[in-house]
Image (cartoon, grey):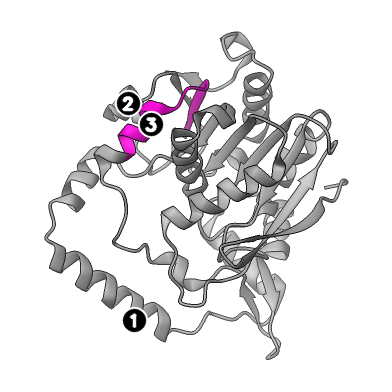
Amino acid sequence: MSQQPRQHRLTSQRLALAINEWGPPDGASVVLVHGGRDHARNWDRVAEVLAKRWRVVAPDLRGHGDSDWTSDGHYTMSSYVYDLAEVIDWVGTGPVHLVGHSLGGNIAIRYAGLFPERIKRLMSIEGIGFAPAIVAEKEARSADVIMREWIEARRKTLAQAHRGYPSLEAAAARMREAHPQLDEALVAHLAAHGARQGADGLWRWKFDPCVRVFPPDDLRQFQKEQLWSRIASPTLLVYGGRSWASNPEADGRARHFRTARVVTFPEAGHWVQHDALDGFLALLSAFLEGREGRSEEEPGKAG
């Protein structure tokens, strides 16, 4: 990417969050929120296009990228949402456009439901959680089972060392193995910004391994749906036709949103912004500019 971001640090709940910023500092703002075990620089290709017109802000979530880890390895959705509230207050330019992927989409949607007046337009890429059948199965489990499973998973994670790689190229090769659809340049870029070299010479992913284990305390599904129903801005729910994620139009979750429209990219998997970059950028640009009703300019399949 030719334009490097301006980098900032913001303290939220006693942790330092890394923030990347592109484009005109006084421009209308687009906030991009990455997914779990990812980092803000995964948005570079998107930011390069948007920054020609917009002020683009992309934070590293707590426990990810160049942001601090928590002292106890505990990462709650409420803390992620609080951090996003701090970031958007830091942006401070009035209502913002908000885009989130996966975990970041879930965080973005919760924030938009809490503070609908702060959001101009909202896009969530595969980011509203589990399908209804999975949610029902999870909520039917007893408290002792939930807590015991969480304790066991936490102990296992804390006991394991973060896997090290002998070189950055070896780390990139592992990413390529997990995501064979990504092109070589993108894999190298994601690995370069997603790993760091330790004192022992080995390269490890920057994210805290504890982010893999979600705590058992969270909102119930009906409470999440209440937040969805409060979102007042135009909303796009973007999905990949080849993803494991359940499409919210097909499973009924889209009905809880006032203004949401579902758009599917048949050729894409979970990382729509990488798997269908050109089409995704065309869709996002049209959406941010208020042209979302002109479907002939938008790739993907609108629901």
- Looking at numbered disc 1 in the image, what kind of residue is underneath it? Arg
Q: CA distance from mark 1 to mark 3?
A: 34 Å
Q: Are marks 3 and 2 in contact (CB under 8 Å)?
A: yes
For residue 24, side relative to residue 250 (left or right): right
- The spot of residue 271 in percent (x, y) is 54, 44
Asked where in the image residue 143 lies, by quadrant, the reply is bottom left
Asked where in the image residue 281 lies, by quadrant, the reply is top right
| Tag 1 residue | 155
**Which residue is depicted at the point 46% across and 66% down?**
211
Between 38 and 228, the one nearer to me in the picture: 228
Q: CA distance from mark 1 to mark 2?
A: 37 Å
Near mark 3 (Cα within 10 A), the count class, few <14, some 14-19 or many ≥20, is many
Q: Secondary structure at mark 3?
A: helix
The label on residue 256 is 2
**Which residue is depicted at the point 77% across and 57% down?**
8
- Looking at numbered disc 2 in the image, what kind of residue is underneath it? His
Which residues, given as a range, are shown in magenta? 224-240
Residue 181 visible at all: no
Q: Are marks 1 and 3 in contact (CB under 8 Å)?
A: no
Q: Earlier in the sequence, mark 1 or mark 3?
A: 1
